[in-house]
Amino acid sequence: MMKLATFASDITPPLGHPLCAGWYPPASEIADPLAALGVVLVPEGKAPIVLCALDWAELSNGDYDRWRGELATAVGTSADRVAVHCVHAHDTPWPDRDAQDILDAHGYPNVIMAGNWAERARAQAAQAAQAALGRLRPCSHIGVGAARVDRIASTRRLLGDDGKIWAVRWTKSPDPVVRAAPEGLIDPMLKTIGFYDGDEPLALLHYYAVHPTSIDGTGQVTPEFVGLARQQRTAESGVPHIYFTGCAGNITAGKYNDGVADNRELFAGRIRDAMVAAEQTLKRQPLVAVRWAVEPVCLPPREDMDEAGLLAALQQQADAAKVHSKTALMLTYWRRRKRPIPFSCLHLGEHVAIAHLPGETFIEYQLHAQAARPDAFVAVAGYGDLGTGYITLASSFAEGGYEPQDAFVSGASEALMRTAIDEILKK
């Protein structure tokens, strides 16, 4: 029989700390605390598995590896049996020590990270995971359910008749013409997986694909509407709830978000209602087998990226912190391009699977994962190792728009992504 325990750790940055790798103003107010929430699974006779969700914008490159490594050491397992994902609320940190080291060397301190706060947050999360081993409970059953989310997700990329992007639906879309366009390709379902000791729920995991931002660039730290909904369900039920953002690279709430401040509360209510509805569909089934699959993949950098060009760009005096930050992040990824990124999947029995994907991944990859196993309940967590930036489709670069500009991997990654997804989802 498998055993299970949950853990939680505070990862709220101090005031003044950079947010979103310096792409947004630094933290000026803590509107809501941030958390690292995780579950430790110990299948009988096998090494532990850790699933962890961070209320951060992103986590990339060496810092992603260090999080996996420290959590693995804490619970006595290997790093390839640890999956760490970010919720991707924008007004939150994006640690990448390797990129900040590059910036330090060029005279740009405290752009992505300041001090050693992020390292201390990681160590505290590892301590929380280790302490969870003393609270392991038998996990005899699981339950799966899903519910449609009411008026949140919409495609960000609006294509014209010429096959080019004519408009982008950002976090908010004040233009009524842009909001009036169809939702586009989305996954409207929030998926929920429950873990039980007999009749008693131990933890509930939720998966939904949308940029979880209603307002950003304010300096007000918050896990946004998905984090607020998760916290509400935990308080209401007394059971730990953990939320994972799916493949939302090209999905926002822009169609339904005109920028009114109380939309955060509105969307939190809609996510909370979908969680409740999905939970009401859960039917317990015995957990008869647990399997972990992992596929290491190297995704090629964008063809126009090279070390000499990126170093030259860093040496230019630019006013915007985002220019320095983005260049350093691109250079960091280029230098680690031959170090594989893990794609992994937790198989719970023969017909339930949770796929863990890297990057700010387009919704098409989530739909591909579901189509790869039509016989199974497939949940997808995106925003793993975000050294890749956006992972678009091969066709996205010709279509234009925002995402290809902030993709650090090339269009050739699409075929590699689809193959890796197929591999980890095999029976």
Image: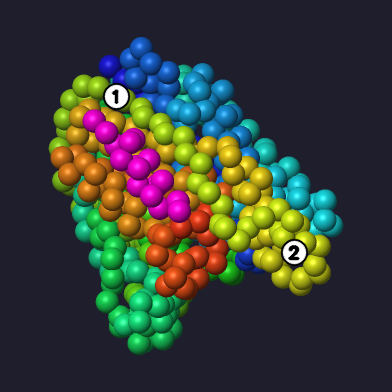
Span highlighted in magenta in the image: 412-427
- Which residue is at a point 19% across and 39% down the rendered structure image? 376
Which secondary structure dominates the residues rendered in magenta? helix
Quarter of the figure with the C terminus: top left
Query: In the rendered image, is residue 328 in sight?
Result: no
Quarter of the figure with the N terminus: top left
Label 1 environment density (alpha carbons within 10 Å; few <14, some 14–19, many ≥20): some
Q: Is residue 421 magenta?
A: yes
Question: Which amino acid is tagged 1?
Answer: Val
Of residues 232 and 313, the one drawn nearer to the viewer in this rendering: 313
Which picture quadrant has residue 352? top left
Instruction: Give the number of the disc on residue 313.
Output: 2
- Which residue is at a point 27% across and 33% down the rendered structure image? 426
> How many numbered marks does the figure carry?
2
Query: In the rendered image, is residue 395 in sight?
Result: yes
Q: Which residue is mark 1?
A: 290
Image vertical order of residue 380 relative to residue 303, above or below:
above
Element type where label 2 sits in the image: helix
State which tag comes first along the sequence, 1 or 2. Answer: 1
Question: Which amino acid is tagged 2?
Answer: Ala
Element type where label 1 sits in the image: strand
Render colour scheme: rainbow
Q: How far separated are the C-alphas under marks 1 and 2?
A: 48 Å
For residue 10, side relative to residue 104 (left or right): left
Do the residues bearing badges 1 and 2 touch, measured as CB atoms within 8 Å?
no
Residue 253, position as x, y percentages in the image: 38, 69
Residue 393, position as x, y percentages in the image: 40, 59
- Which residue is at a point 65% across and 60% down the rendered structure image? 326
- Which residue is at a point 28% across and 53% down the rendered structure image? 367
Q: Is residue 377 magenta?
A: no
